Every structure is written in structure tokens, then in C-alpha cells.
């Protein structure tokens, strides 16, 4: 699959690390329609590109992302217009499902996705980062489930994914109040893995983690994401059965042999994509 071109995203690939940078800095990277669709194409490309072993999603300018572009909400009535109210609502439902799918493409991507968050991460941006495998923040980052202040229910993933990260009670508090939390509280709650002193330190630290992942067995890394995502949605017994099936198929790989050879020779292993 060819690397997608999207005016609202800056996409690069270097040494196994794909970077997807939200690129509307003049709008605090508010997610407009081209960006929604571009995110799905970008992560389908990451998934299908063997040389991309891990991905970072970040934001250009002063903020990671200010959420959905409010102009999209303003145009909703025109987009779904139909003389039949039921048909109009059917179109709206399909639109919401499609926006959900744009973000779920991050979760479907077989490669680990790391979010590097600075400044604002509110509304739809929080939906976005909850799809990622790990989240890292600069000290100036702040987070909010902003939809309640627009008189609407968050509908593209936060309400489903955030409770699994920070617990049901805190997720409800943030959803009901729209309260803003800072980087320190986000880390304490388990929303983020680590906080860095600055955006520069954040980018360097996240790239270091991504590079460490890129140096591991790509087959095993993809398997980890597959098994952990499956296990999150199923019982322990189901998860154990699934990983047994996975390893029955994938354990005896060239990567396993290369790890053993590399350890014996005290060198870094080299893996095919």
C-alpha cells in the first residue's frame, strides 16, 4: 500500500518508526473531515507496511489536538437532511459509526501505537488517544471529556475505552463534569504512562521507547497486541486459550531462532520485517 497523502497529516517512516503528526496547528489540530478519513488511511498504511514496526501519533504546534472541528457539528443538519426524519437519523447513525471506525483503525493496526501528547487533548482527541497502546505526556498537557459542555454524549470511543484505563468511577466523574485534568493527575490515574518536562523531552523519550520496540521481533510484537487486545475483551480462560492457539501457530519462528543465536553470540538480533 502506498504511503497516503493527506494535507492534514504529516506522515513519515524512518528506522521502523512511522510518525503520524496531526498537522492543522493553526486550528490546534482540530479534527476535520479530511483528518478523520486521513487517520484511517494512515493506520491502514502502517498496518500493511512491513517496514513500519511501531507508530507514534503526535500533534504539530502548541497543542496535541483540540478535538472535533466544531464546524463539522455545525454542518451536521445539512449532511443528514432528508424529508423523512427516520432516514435522516439513519444517516446520522451511519456517520457516527464511520467516525468511530476512523479511530478504531488505530486499535486495529497490528503495530503498537504510541501517543505523544502536549498541550490540549480534549474531546475527540481523548477518544483518539484511548485507542493507542500507550500514552505519554509533556508537563503542559491537559485532558478533558469536553462533550458534556456541548450538551452531547461522547460517541467515538472515550466512554467505552477510558474506564478500562482509569476505572469506572473516575471516568464517570470526568464525563459528567467535563473537569480538566493536568499531566500529573493523568499519570496518577493511569491514563498516561509517563510525564516529561517539555515537548522536546517528550518527543525524544517517545522515540526512544518506539526505537526499543522497533528492535524487537516484529512477529512477536504483533502477536502481543493481538493477544492483549483479545484478552481485554474476554475472560482469563478465553485469553489463555487464545494465546495457546496463537503460539501453536507462531512460536516456532525464524525470530525465535534468531533471538537464541543472538544471545549465544552476545549481539543484537536482526529480524526480517
Image: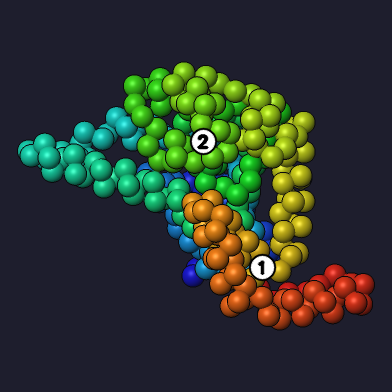
Q: Quadrant of residue 176?
A: top left
- Quadrant for the C terminus, please: bottom right
Density class for disc 1 (Cα within 10 Å; few <14, some 14-19, many ≥20) is some
SS label for mark 1: helix
User: Which residue is under mark 2?
Assistant: 163
Q: In the rendered view, would you say 101 is above or below 145?
A: below
- Badge number at residue 137: none
* Residue found at x 75% / y 64%: 215
SS label for mark 2: helix
Q: Nearer the viewer, residue 241 or 153?
A: 241
Horizontal relation, residue 98 to residue 30: left or right? left
Residue 195's spot in the image, x, y percent? 73, 34
Residue 242's spot in the image, x, y percent? 54, 65
Q: Nearer the viewer, residue 210 or 201?
A: 210
* Residue found at x 54% / y 26%: 170
Residue 164's spot in the image, x, y percent? 54, 40
Q: Quadrant of residue 41?
A: bottom left
Density class for disc 2 (Cα within 10 Å; few <14, some 14-19, many ≥20) is some
Q: Earlier in the sequence, mark 2 or mark 1?
A: 2
Q: Is residue 181 visible?
A: yes
User: Which residue is under mark 1?
Assistant: 220
Q: Which mark is nearer the camera, 2 or 1? A: 2
* Residue found at x 41% / y 26%: 147
Amino acid at each position: 500500500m502506498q504511503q497516503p497523502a493527506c494535507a492534514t497529516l504529516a506522515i513519515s517512516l524512518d528506522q521502523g518508526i512511522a510518525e503520524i503528526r496531526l498537522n492543522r496547528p493553526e486550528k490546534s489540530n482540530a479534527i476535520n473531515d479530511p483528518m478523520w478519513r486521513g487517520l484511517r488511511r494512515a493506520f491502514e498504511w502502517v498496518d500493511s507496511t512491513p517496514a513500519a514496526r511501531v507508530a507514534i501519533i503526535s500533534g504539530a504546534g502548541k497543542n496535541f489536538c483540540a478535538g472535533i472541528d466544531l464546524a463539522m457539528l455545525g454542518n451536521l443538519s445539512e449532511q443528514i437532511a432528508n424529508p423523512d426524519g427516520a432516514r435522516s437519523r439513519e444517516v446520522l447513525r451511519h456517520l457516527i459509526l464511520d467516525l468511530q471506525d476512523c479511530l478504531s483503525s488505530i486499535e486495529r493496526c497490528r503495530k503498537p501505537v504510541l501517543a505523544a501528547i502536549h498541550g490540549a487533548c480534549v474531546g475527540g482527541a481523548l477518544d483518539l488517544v484511548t485507542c493507542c497502546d500507550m500514552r505519554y505526556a509533556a508537563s503542559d498537557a491537559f485532558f478533558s471529556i469536553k462533550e458534556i459542555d456541548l450538551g452531547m454524549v461522547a460517541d467515538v470511543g472515550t466512554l467505552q475505552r477510558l474506564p478500562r484505563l482509569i476505572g469506572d468511577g473516575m471516568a464517570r466523574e470526568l464525563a459528567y463534569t467535563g473537569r480538566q485534568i493536568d499531566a500529573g493527575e493523568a499519570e496518577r490515574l493511569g491514563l498516561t504512562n509517563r510525564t516529561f518536562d517539555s515537548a522536546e523531552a517528550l518527543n525524544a523519550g517517545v522515540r526512544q521507547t518506539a526505537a526499543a520496540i522497533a528492535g524487537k521481533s516484529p512477529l512477536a510484537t504483533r502477536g502481543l497486541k493481538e493477544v492483549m487486545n483479545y484478552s481485554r475483551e474476554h475472560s482469563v480462560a478465553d485469553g489463555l486459550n487464545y494465546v495457546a492457539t496463537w503460539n501453536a501457530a507462531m512460536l516456532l519462528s525464524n525470530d525465535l531462532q534468531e533471538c537464541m543465536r543472538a544471545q549465544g553470540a552476545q549481539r543484537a538480533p536482526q529480524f526480517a520485517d
